[in-house]
Image: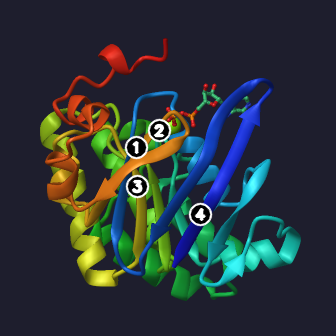
Amino acid sequence: MIRVEDLHRAFGGQRVLRGLTLQVAPGEIMVVIGRSGGGKSVLLKHLLGLLRPDSGRVVVNGTDITHLRGPALDRIRERYGVVFQGGALFDSMSVFDNVAFPLREKTRLRSREITGRVEEKLDQVGLAGMGHKNPAEISGGMRKRVAIARALVTEPEVVFFDEPTTGLDPILVNTIHHLILGMHRKFRFTAVMVSHEIPEIFGIADRVAMLHDGVIVEQGTPDVIQGSANPIVQQFVRGDVEGALRPA
Ligand SMILES: Nc1ncnc2c1ncn2[C@@H]1O[C@H](COP(=O)(O)OP(=O)(O)O)[C@@H](O)[C@H]1O
Ligand SMILES: [Mg+2]
């Protein structure tokens, strides 16, 4: 479904991606872990076509998107849903209009159909009847739900989640993970998620990839990652998220 081949990307002199290779299979939940500032969001932005690599390729469903632009890139992005880091709702719009936004942007659906789809999606994320609220009036956990509803409302083939639970307390982290898992069971999209939530993500990932020093140092099922002999992975999985993993 998604193939990342030998991706290199530097900003100024800072080499963030240093030959990153990764494959995501159709319908799986792939979770990318790694320390803060390690390049996880930069990787997602390459998958979205928002950043271009210095070298290497991103292939989506057999199409090399690395150098696509304009309408050709838009056609790929139409099949994507994105939950950006921080949720990033439009504060000036109601919950309803936030969720309706991708349908209004990407489809030619009539307003009655849009209303139906938005209400259905709000119901699926547990926010039935909340469409009239403003993002500022609802809790952090509810805002994440709105962001998820917005990402899924077009029924995308691929959904990207950039730290969808950051800033939530542990109970809400689990609630949101269960929501994502439930939606995944129902709609079977391919998911690429960036997360810091160790050990919670091991309960929802089909596979996990650890990004370190610009490359994927280990990937596999949660069991493989948790049992990895690689000291960098071990340390991260034990919860020492920063510690000795900080660059020298
Ligand atoms: N557009 C940009 N311009 C310059 N530096 C950037 C840009 N985007 C990211 N970086 C740098 O790349 C590194 C990785 O960032 P990021 O991918 O956001 O890390 P994270 O793994 O926490 O998501 C950071 O040092 C960040 O400052
Ligand atoms: Mg990030």
Q: Earlier in the sequence, mark 1 or mark 2?
A: 2
Q: Of the residues tagged 2 and 4, which is closer to the observer?
A: 4
Q: Position of residue 72 (x, y in %)?
A: 82, 78
From the viewer's side, name the closer residue of 204 and 83: 204
The residue identified by callout 4 is: 4
Image quadrant assignment for residue 77? bottom right
Please, what secondary structure does the residue beneath circle 3 have? strand
Mark linked to residue 193: 3
Task: Classify mark 1 as within 8 Å of ligand 2 or not, answering yes or no.
Answer: yes
Height in image: 17 above or below 57?
A: above
Q: Position of residue 61 (x, y in %)?
A: 59, 83
Q: Of the residues tagged 1 and 2, which is closer to the observer?
A: 1
Q: Earlier in the sequence, mark 2 or mark 4?
A: 4
Q: Is residue 49 left or right of residue 220?
A: right
How far apart are the alpha carbons under marks 3 and 4? 15 Å
How far apart are the alpha carbons under marks 1 and 2? 7 Å
* Ligand 1 - quadrant of the structure image: top right
